[in-house]
Structure formats: C-alpha cells, structure tokens
C-alpha cells in the first residue's frame, strides 16, 4: 500500500524523465488529475489522457523534451508537504520557486493551482510540490 500517492506520482514522472520515456502511465486519483492539468497548462508536459476503463483508472502523460538538445522540460520535481509533515502557506507567504522561473503547486479551498494563481485568487493552502 502506498501512503503518499502524490510522492509516488512525482517519482514515476521523475523516473520516466531520467529514462527518456515518451509516455508514462500513472494510477489516477482526483488530486493527481488536477496536478496533471496544472502541469499541462504551464507547459511542462506535452499532453495527457485520463483512462477510466478500470475501477481506479489511469493517467497517461506524454512527456515534453527539447527537440534540439533532448533535455526534458522538467528539471526537478520536489515534494514539499508530506503526510507526516504538512506545509501550509498563507497568501502573504506563498513560496517563489527559482525567483519565479519554477512553479509551486498548492492545494487550496478553490482547487489545485500554482502559487501565482493563488495570489490572484487571494487564497493560501497546502504546498504540494515545487517544479522547475
């Protein structure tokens, strides 16, 4: 049994990027689907598809690479808040990743969003991960 599904999601993405895979398949959950949508809208992944044919369902993610250098679009994935130690941020103390070059994904009362969107919505929340 997996006690931290978001860490498992990030690890599967990280391993697929290191192995230069084009597509990675991940067991689905609502929070993982929302994180995937944020990654797509911010340009870190090429495309995604939710497959709900089985009971749990899966997420198929097409990873994005630079065509010239073959470097992945995602350099680092870092889990911040864990089940044993939750990290929350108030709207005035939202984290900035690499001085604004990366994103922090937050789980807020208005849904899963980046720190920039949370600042415009004027909400704080649990800091799930940093991506750059």
Image: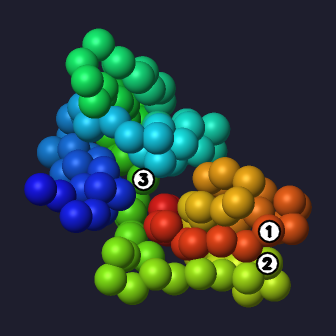
Name the residue: 47% across, 26% down.
47
- Residue of label 2: 91
**Residue drawn at point x = 37 percent, y = 76 percent:** 82
Please name whichever residue, 61 or 90, is drawn nearer the observer in this view of the structure: 90
Along the polypeptide, which appears first: circle 3 or circle 1? 3
Outermost top residue: 53
> Compared with residue 50, is residue 81 higher up or lower down, i.e. above or below?
below
**Spot occupied by residue 113 in the image (x, y as percentages of width and height):** 66, 54
Give the position of the N terminus as an image quadrant: bottom left
Q: CA distance from mark 2 to mark 3?
A: 26 Å
Q: Residue at x 37, y 46 (%)?
A: 72
Name the residue beneath numbered marker 3: 74
Spatial CA span between label 2 and label 1: 5 Å
Which residue is label 1 attached to? 123
Locate residue 48 relative to residue 127 in the image: left or right. Answer: left
Assess whether mark 1 and mark 2 are in contact (beta carbons under 8 angstroms).
yes
Residue placed most toward the observer, 131 or 92? 92
Q: Say which of 111 and 49 sits in front.
A: 111
The answer to which of marks 2 and 3 sits earlier in the sequence is 3
Which secondary structure, mark 2? helix
Q: Position of residue 48 (x, y in %)?
A: 44, 26
Name the side, left or right, on which 78 lies relative to 26: right
Q: Which element is circle 3 on?
A: loop
SS type, badge 1: loop
Looking at the rendered image, the disc whose residue lies closer to the viewer, 2 or 3, is 2
Q: Residues within 10 Å of mark 2 (few under 14, many from 20)?
A: some
């Amino acid at each position: 049994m997996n006690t931290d599904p978001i860490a498992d999601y990030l690890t599967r993405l990280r391993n697929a990027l290191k192995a230069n895979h084009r597509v990675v398949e991940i067991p689905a959950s609502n929070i993982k689907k929302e994180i995937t949508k944020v990654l797509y809208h911010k340009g870190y992944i090429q495309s995604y598809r939710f497959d709900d044919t089985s009971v749990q369902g899966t997420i198929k993610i097409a990873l994005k690479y630079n065509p010239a250098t073959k470097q992945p679009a995602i350099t680092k994935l870092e889990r911040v808040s864990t089940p044993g130690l939750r990290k929350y941020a108030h709207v005035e103390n939202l984290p900035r990743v690499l001085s604004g070059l990366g994103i922090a994904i937050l789980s807020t009362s208005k849904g899963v969003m980046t720190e920039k969107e949370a600042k415009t919505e004027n909400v704080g929340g649990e800091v799930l991960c940093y991506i750059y």
